[in-house]
């Protein structure tokens, strides 16, 4: 993996449209903005009890934010709601340079750029907001 901020794996994830869009009749949804850079993330969830059946994201923002949203959506779909905390911990470890997790490790170069941490954390914050009162 490259140490460049916008390396090939980040750009590939930012272009991943597999879970891009909205869910008609979403069980939970949240939209958050990063006023410092202008990123805006909307996450929609279709839940069955504790299970996340479907996740879709709509991002107006930088490649880091789009890549993080795509990664998170893929990681949560089909999982239990507890997977959100596990994924947040994995991202935090990647930003600290302390992970070999293949899913989140691609964000390790962002760790050296504190001003960009909010870009990759915004989708997780939106997911937390959407799922906060679910269940």
Image: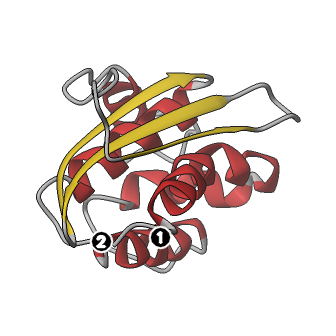
At x 35%, y 51%, the residue is: 72
Q: Which residue corresponds to mark 1? A: 88
Quarter holding residue 49? bottom left
Residue 99 percent across, percent down from the top left: 40, 76
Closer to the eye: label 1 or 2: 2
- Of mark 1 and mark 2, the one earlier in the sequence is 2
Residue 86 percent across, percent down from the top left: 36, 78
- Label 1 element class: helix
Viewer-closest of 25 and 132: 25
Q: Which residue corresponds to mark 2? A: 81
Q: In this view, does 78 lie above or below 8?
A: below
At x 65%, y 60%, the residue is: 111
In the rendered image, the quadrant that contains the C terminus is: bottom left
Task: Look at the image and tell me whether residue 6 can be seen.
Answer: no
Q: In this view, does 31 lie above or below 46?
A: above
In the displayed structure, does residue 107 sit left or right of residue 121? left
Neighbour tally class for label 2: few under 14, some 14-19, many 20 plus, Cα within 10 Å = many
């Amino acid at each position: 993996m490259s140490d460049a901020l916008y390396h090939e794996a980040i750009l590939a994830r930012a272009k991943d449209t597999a879970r891009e869009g909205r869910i008609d009749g979403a069980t939970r949804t949240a939209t958050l903005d990063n006023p410092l850079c202008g990123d805006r993330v909307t996450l929609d969830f279709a839940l069955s009890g504790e299970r996340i059946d479907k996740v879709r994201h709509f991002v107006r923002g930088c490649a880091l934010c789009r890549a993080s949203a795509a990664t998170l959506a893929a990681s949560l779909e089909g999982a239990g709601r507890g997977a959100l905390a596990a994924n947040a911990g994995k991202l935090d470890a990647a930003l600290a340079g302390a992970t070999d997790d293949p899913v989140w490790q691609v964000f390790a170069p962002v760790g050296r750029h504190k001003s960009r941490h909010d870009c990759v954390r915004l989708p997780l914050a939106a997911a937390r907001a959407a799922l906060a009162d679910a269940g």
